[in-house]
Image (cartoon, rainbow, N blue to C red):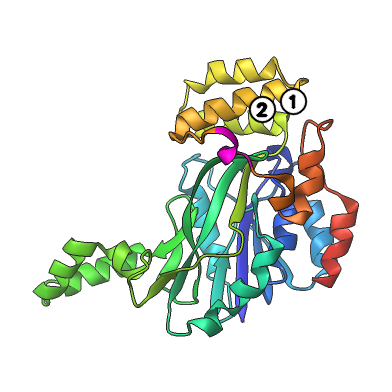
Amino acid sequence: MISGFMTLKNVLTSGYPFVEAISSILPICDELLISEGYSTDGTFTVLKNIANVNKKVKIFRQEWPTNRKYTDITEVTNIVRAKCKYDYIFSIQANEIIHEDDVTLIKALPEICPQITAFTLPFIHLVKGYKFYEDFRLRLAKNLDNIVAVSDAWTLGVSESFITSEIRKTIFHPRRLRQYINKGVEWTFANTCSSSLSRSFYLPKPIYRYWSLFPRDYIEKCQKHMEMFSLNNLKQDVALLQNHVDDPELFWANAVDLRRKELGFNYPGDLGLIKLSDHPKIVRDLLSDSSSKSYYVRDDVLTSLKDL
């Protein structure tokens, strides 16, 4: 059985498609634990409605740290991660949507490879329907104390205490130290196809990570990144985009160009554009909506959650 977990706060303001993300993971999980950071934008009200219609969803409210470090989300994520009770854990963030074609395979991975501790799965990072980059991320793992959310909670990994204990062991086992130097602790335990403890698995479709779906949400996210990461170089970019909010074609052309330059990916031609029919079904209507400027919760999606 699988425990899913997610952390979020004020995601309505940020434009995260969190209702769609919850809907996409519920068929995989036997419980979904959500840490909610006392939102002030209506997010909590939506979550309560979701929990009322689907008993798998369990909400835990907790105060977030106020020092605005990028690791704050890791701290709160690992509090809710520790509450997971089933044999496997699955990490998903509020802007990530699992394609319906992947559900059966992901759910079967523990049975396919029962000896494997952790699975890395493919994802693509998008703005609207445009690719920014693609990679693998460790998301599904056995529910072991030494596997936690790391960095800014973007992936699972091994805990600092576990790493420290393994380093101490190498004092008495020099061969183990040599192995770590050659491969690295993370390579050995969490992030390689060749490890007996971890496997990378291809899926019928990657997991879709939407950085933004609507213009005002994109600008809001840029402004938050400027504040959190001191990215003052984004000011001119934001000012440019604000002038084009009412012109979707020009807005997204500029937004995609700016984001790709930042990340260093350059997809030629149509290689960087995902066809509407390839996206998860649950998000296609949002992608097709050129009139809205910000994310909105759809009643029909909320209603459908009770059957998942």
Is 91 in front, or is 182? 182
Q: Is mark 1 on a helix, strand or loop?
A: helix
Residue 56 in picture, x, y percent from top left: 74, 73
| In-image side of 298 versus 246 (left or right) | right
Q: How far apart are marks 2 and 1 (CA)?
A: 6 Å
Amino acid at the residue labelled 1:
Pro
Q: Give the range drawn in magenta.
A: 269-273
Quarter in which the C terminus is drawn: bottom right
Q: What element carries label 2?
A: helix
Is 126 in front, or is 29? 126
Q: Disc 2 vs disc 1: Cβ atoms closer than 8 Å?
A: yes
Residue that appears at 68% across and 23% down: 251
| In-image side of 56 versus 142 (left or right) | right
| In-image side of 4 versus 289 (left or right) | left
Q: In this view, does 175 lie above or below 137?
A: below
Is 225 in front, or is 279? 279
Residue density around tag 2, few if under 14, some if 14–19, many if 20 or more, within 10 Å: many
The residue beneath circle 1 is 248
* Residue 42 shows in this picture: no
Residue 11: name its quadrant: top right
